Amino acid sequence: MSQFKNLKFDEFKVNKMKKLLEMGVNCYPYKYDRKISLNDIKEKYKDITHEKSEEEVVTAGYIYVIRQMGRVIFVDLKDESGSIQLYLREDSLGKSNFKTFRDYIETGDVIGVKGNVFRTKKEEITIWVNHYEILSKSLCPLPEKYHGLRDVAKRYRYRYVDLKINEEIRALFKTRSKVVSRIRRFLDDRDFLEFETPILQPLYGGANARPFTTHHNFLKQDFYLRIAPELYLKRLIVGGFERVYEIARNFRNEDIDTTHNPEFSMLELYEAYKDYNDIMTLCEDLIAEVVVDIHGKPEIEFNETTISFKKPWKKITMEESVKEYGDINIYEYSLEELKQIAGEKGFEDYEKATTHGEFLVVFFENLVEKNITQPTFIYDFPIEVSPLAKKHRKKEGFTERFELFIGGYEVANGFSELNDPLDQKERFEAQDRKRLSGDQEAHVIDYDYINALGYGMPPTGGIGIGIDRLVMLLTNKTSIKEVILFPQMKVQNITDDSNPE
C-alpha cells in the first residue's frame, strides 16, 4: 500500500525530491527576488534580435512543458501574466547543473531563472538561462498538456489545478474580481458606505429560504448562517445612515443546480428617501456601467444571443407580462380554474398556491421567466410573496417590488422598503402561519427588527443583486459553478477518485 494514502503524490516525484535533498538542494526556499514578470519581459524585449540582450533578467514561474534534445533543453515557463520559452544548454549551465535539471526537474516545478533574452530562429522570444533555482518541487502530476481537466466535476473539485493550467479560467476569475471592484467604485462614488453585518444570526431573515443551523456552545443557543443581510442593513438606515451597502456571502440550505449554490455572493444596498422607481434607475446605471467597463461596449454575447444593455431597459408589470407571454389574465379566472390550467400545463409548485397573487407568481415563473432575454424589470408583485416590500400606493393586493431578469435569469430583486412597523408585524405573522403549516422557506418573526422600525425608518429603496449570476452573464457561462471558485460538492474520499486528468 502506498505511504501516501489519501494524497495525490506521485512516488517517482517524491523520490526525486528526496534525492535533491540528499544532494543538498533546498526544494522549498523562503524567498526569491523576482525582478520582472514573464509578460513584461516579452513586452520589454518585443524588438529583440537574434543576439542575446546585454542585460540579464531575473524571473520565476512554473514549468508547463519540457522538451529535451540532447545537450539542450527547451522549457515553457508560466506565471500569472503569461508564458515564455527557456533555453538551457549544457555548456552554459555546466554539466552538473544541466544533469540535475535533466534528471530531477519536471513539469509543475516552480523555478527561478537568470538569463539573457534573445529571439530564436523560429522568431520566439526566449530566455537563455545562465542559472536556475528550484523554488518548489511539485509532487503531484499535472494533467496532460493539450486536454487539461476533461472531467467537469474534477475541474470544480480541483480548482487549483484548473486555474494552474487553464488561462481561460484564470481570466474568468480576474473578470469576476474586476466586476466586484467596479461595483464598489460605482457605489463609493455616490457616497454609499460599505458595512459588514453578522453572518451568524440568532434569527434568519431578509428572504424566503431555508437556513443552515449551527450551535454556539458558550451562549448555549442555536444560530443561523445568514440568508441575507437585509434586516441588519435596514437597521443601519434606522440608525441614521442614509446610503449603505454590503457585498455579502449568503447561505441557503437549498437545492444545487445551474443557477443555485448554497453559498453565494450578493450586493445589497439601501438608500433613504428613495422608492423602487429610483432603485430601478440606480440598478440600470450600475449594471450598464459595469458591462461597458468589462466589455468596452454595451452589448455582450450570452448563450448564442446578443444582449444589449443600452438604456432605457424594458419595464413591465408581472400581471402584464403573464398576459403578454401566456395570453392569460389571472384575475379573470377562479382559483379552481387556475389550478386546473396549471395542472394541465404541468406547472411546477402550483399545488401550494391558494390565492390569485400566488397563482400569478406560478404562471409568471412557468410561462415568462425563462423567455426574458434582454434586460427587463418585472414590477408590482403580489403582497403574499413580498413580506418586506411596501404596499403599492395605488393597486390593492400588490407591493412596490421589482425583479430584474436578463438571459432568462433573475439577477436582482428590489423594493420600496416596508417601514410601517404595524404592517411589518402583520406580514411576519402571516409568514409565520405559513411556516407553522409546513412552509420551510417562510419568513420567521423578527421582533427586534419590528422594534427597530418602531424608532422610525425613513422612506427607503433597496435592492439585492446576485454577483454570481451577473458574472455568469458577463463571462457567457450557463452554470453558476463555473463562476464560483470553490463550489459546494459532495464530500468524496480522495482515494475513490483518480488523478485529476
Image (cartoon, rainbow, N blue to C red):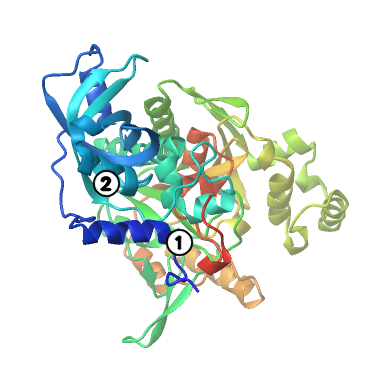
Residue 388 coordinates in the image, percent (x, y): 49, 58
Residue 9 seen from this side: no
Q: Secondary structure at mark 2?
A: helix
Looking at the rendered structure, the secondary structure element under dot 1 is loop
Q: Earlier in the sequence, mark 1 or mark 2?
A: 1
Residue drawn 46% across the image and 69% down it: 204
Residue at x 40%, y 25% (from the top left corner): 292
Image location (x, y in percent) of residue 147: 54, 39
Residue 476 located left or right of residue 102: right
- Which is more foreground, mark 1 or mark 2? 2
State the image coordinates of residue 385 (x, y, percent, origin top left).
60, 57
Q: Which mark is residue 100?
A: 2
- Tally of numbered tags: 2
Q: Is residue 73 above or below residue 133?
A: above
Q: Which residue is denoted by mark 1 in the rendering?
A: 8
Mark 1–mark 2 Cα distance, whole angstroms, equals 24 Å
Q: Is residue 21 above or below residue 325?
A: below
The amino acid pointed to by label 2 is Thr
Tell me if residue 209 comes above or below residue 458 in the rendering.
below
Q: Nearer the viewer, residue 486 or 363?
A: 486
Label 1 crowd (10 A; few <14 / some 14-19 / many >=20): some
Q: Is residue 41 visible?
A: yes
Amino acid, disc 1 = Lys
